[in-house]
Amino acid sequence: MQVTAPTFESAASTATDGGEPRPVLDDLAYLCTVMVNVFFVGGPGDRNWVLVDAGMPGSAHRIAHAAENRFGAGSRPSAIILTHGHFDHVGGLPTLADSWDVPIYAHRMELPYLTGRSPYPPPDPTVGGGLLAYLSWLYPQGPFDFGDRVRPLPEDGTVPNLPGWRWVATPGHSPGHVSFFREADRTLIAGDAFVTTKQESALSVLTQHEEIHGPPKYFTPDWESAARSVRDLADLHPEIAATGHGIPLRGEPMRAGLDALAREFKTRAVPAHGRYVGHPAIADDGGIVYVPPDVPHEMPVLLGLAAGILAGAAITRSRR
């Protein structure tokens, strides 16, 4: 079950051409890289802005081009700040961090997955909801190693180089997932704590169908923590919600949808079955320490059968 509403108000401007990010506010814009958003926060000029998340693998050139379009030729961020480190949020990091010569900040509980110490819990393709969930067993789970550029976010909740913003711990989708909130105008960058499209569905992702939805099911290993995180974000009463997947939304319809998701998280967001339903993965500051047993699923078997059939056909053909 999902929260839908035809009256959601987009917080972004109309689409732009030439790779320019879509403005949300004067000092906030976003760019969708295949199926995940990155955010540009700050003003024009060199080192006057930060990048939040780093998109899909292969997206570094597009992100850098978009940054130059928004901030000026040669403009570099003062930092790259991560909501979390799943593969679709760090794809551009190896190229961007080196070419821009910038630090990478993440919550300390996320550092093991960014410094080569631990993979993430395996995705769960049995959760249902669409093709992207079904194919998730193919998605990279790390470990990723971005070296000594990676630093922990300050424990006091401040965000480096973003005065007026604070980070909010929103674990569940990943152990060290964080969101970013600016009290002055109640702007929220929520990462994947919740999203504004049904990320499990390829059709919803392609059309960017607007709905308030729980975190992507196939990559969420702790549903109780995820539920608490959504409640915490709903309690902020954001005016703008910019999420890792889907179009940024604003206003009362968005808040009503988020409140409904927080109240009814178990029925609206948690899958009916799955590897982590009732049995969360457990992590400490060194990485994953426990993962529940796998839930059998048919995709690898089907692919194996298909490969066998193709191989048999090829052998038969070669003998003719």
Image (cartoon, rainbow, N blue to C red):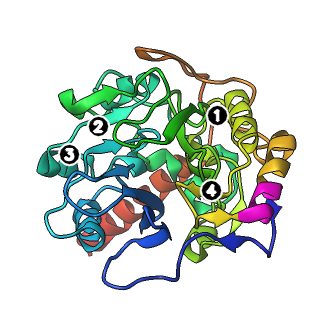
> How many marks can you see?
4
Residue at label 2?
A: 104
Say whether disc 2 or disc 1 marks the residue closer to the N-terminus: 2
Closer to the chain start, of discs 2 and 4, is: 2
The answer to whether residue 180 is left or right of residue 239 is left
Give the residue displayed 42% in from the left and 41% down from the top.
163
Label 3 near label 2: C-beta < 8 Å? yes
Between 290 and 256, the one lying in front of the other is: 256
Q: Hey, what amino acid is under mark 1?
A: Val
Per the picture, the main secondary structure of the magenta-coloured stretch is: helix
Q: Considering only order in the chain, which callout, 3 or 2, is on the residue closer to the N terminus?
A: 3
Foreground disc of the pair 1, 3? 3
Residue appearing at x 76%, y 37% in the figure = 231
Q: Secondary structure at mark 3?
A: helix
Along the line of sight, which residue is nearer the eye, 231 or 154? 154
Q: CA distance from mark 3 to mark 4?
A: 26 Å
Q: Earlier in the sequence, mark 4 or mark 1?
A: 4
Tag of residue 241 = 4
Q: Is residue 141 above or below residue 8?
A: above
Name the secondary structure under disc 1.
loop
Q: CA distance from mark 1 to mark 3?
A: 37 Å
Q: How far apart are labels 2 and 4 at the CA level?
A: 23 Å
Q: Where is the N terminus found, in terms of image quarters? A: bottom right
Q: Secondary structure at mark 4?
A: strand
**Mark 4 or 1, closer to the camera:** 4
The picture quadrant where one finds residue 295 is: top right
